[in-house]
Amino acid sequence: MTPWSTAAIGDVAEIVSGATPKTGDAAYWDGGVPWATPRDLSCLEGPTIALTERTLTSAGLASCAASLLPAGSVLLSSRAPIGHVAINTVPMATNQGFKSLVPHRGLLEAKYAYHWLRANTAYLESLGNGATFKELSKAALSRVSIPLPPMEEQLRIAAILDQADALRAKRREALAAVKALTRSIFVSVFGHPLVNDRGWPERELQGLGRVVTGKTPPTAEQAMFGGPIPFVTPGDLGSGRPPKRTLTEAGATHSRVVRRGATLVCCIGATIGKVGRAECASAFNQQINAVEWNEAVHDAYGYASLEFRRGVIAAAGTSTTLPLLNKSGFQRLRIPVPPSELQLEYARQVRLAERVATDHSTQLDQFDVLFASLQDRAFKGDL
């Protein structure tokens, strides 16, 4: 067990809240002061941030309670959601969704604080209060106790975790490159998927397979959940992970089940158009429409065609409270249908790429386990 002392975060760092100038005053916006929101942090591929979607003028910064954080501060989102973390490499302000840390020199190293906060996201979330959405208050964060090894040890821990995190980042980049490759293969074989510049005949989905809308079994019936049959929801689509929920055989009879290879498409809500694939016989909820392709469309081609059409699907949805594309509208969507031999050649090439992707995904899982272990040991003093 570590002999390190601990300290309240408020004793080793200044905690700074953010703010937003009046959005209707053009004199406050599009200046030279980066202004971060939680959304900016959600898009980061690494630990640092230098550019933000929006910027302030000096007048905008002076008009509100936001402060200019020095480079090397630790930005922590405190609501919607709690727990996004980054280190700014240039002076920067934030909106009110942050409680940022300006470490006291000689007491707290920014990279060490960054990794500790990331490792304790669930704990920080548990400290949030609020009815509509949870928010981590400045007072609550200031009381949080953090292990405080000597500065040289903080630097050593941060360097080890940086290296381990970099390995994970390389695997994610490799996976993204494979996905980009499969899209390039599609275009090289079939032409532009939305323009249909090679003039393939187009047909409606309802003529290219069985279109099915999902259904959720009665949630109060425990005997319907926890079995061997995957139960896909929109959050599972495209995640690369098995669905979080499963059904029993009894549950499946109260849902909808499609065969392996069917394409699943979210047709309601903020993720309308999101596409996934049934990796085995799978059930799915009512937010999803599925297509079990017939002999005219290879599963790999049908999946890719609809993935390219996410924007088209979203645009086809009606909107009241939530965007919605019902089964009737979904099955009238049209896609080009190239010759079967071209679809088979595309599927062969994609299989090869997917084998590479599976290798990268397996390695990423291993690196994730390693990183979690290193985090746990690091802050216990066992690294």
Image (cartoon, rainbow, N blue to C red):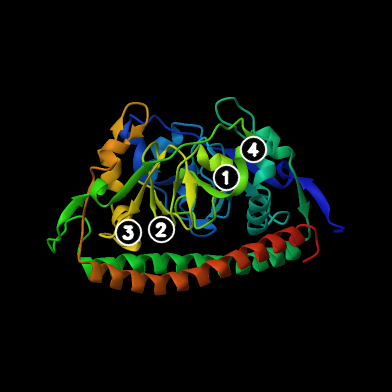
Q: Amino acid at mark 1?
A: Glu
**Can the viewer see residue 64 in this picture?**
yes
> Residue 319 appears in which quarter of the rendering?
top left
Count of numbered marks: 4
How much space separates mark 3 and mark 4, taking CA atoms? 36 Å
Residue shown at 56%/30% (left/top)?
133
As displayed, is residue 195 above or below residue 268? below
Instruction: Give the label, 1 or 3, closer to the camera.
Output: 1
User: Do the CB atoms of the residues marked 2 and 3 lie less than 8 Å apart?
Assistant: no
Q: Nearer the viewer, residue 199 or 255?
A: 255
Element at badge 4?
helix
As displayed, is residue 261 above or below residue 189? above
Instruction: Give the label, 3 or 4, closer to the camera.
Output: 4
Name the residue that disc number 2 marks.
261
Name the residue that disc number 1 marks.
249
Labels 1 and 3: the sequence-earlier one: 1
Residue shown at 68%/48% (left/top)?
120
Residue 322 lies, in percent from the top left, at 37, 31
Name the residue that disc number 4 marks.
223
Labels 4 and 2: the sequence-earlier one: 4
Name the residue that disc number 3 marks.
304
Element at badge 3?
helix
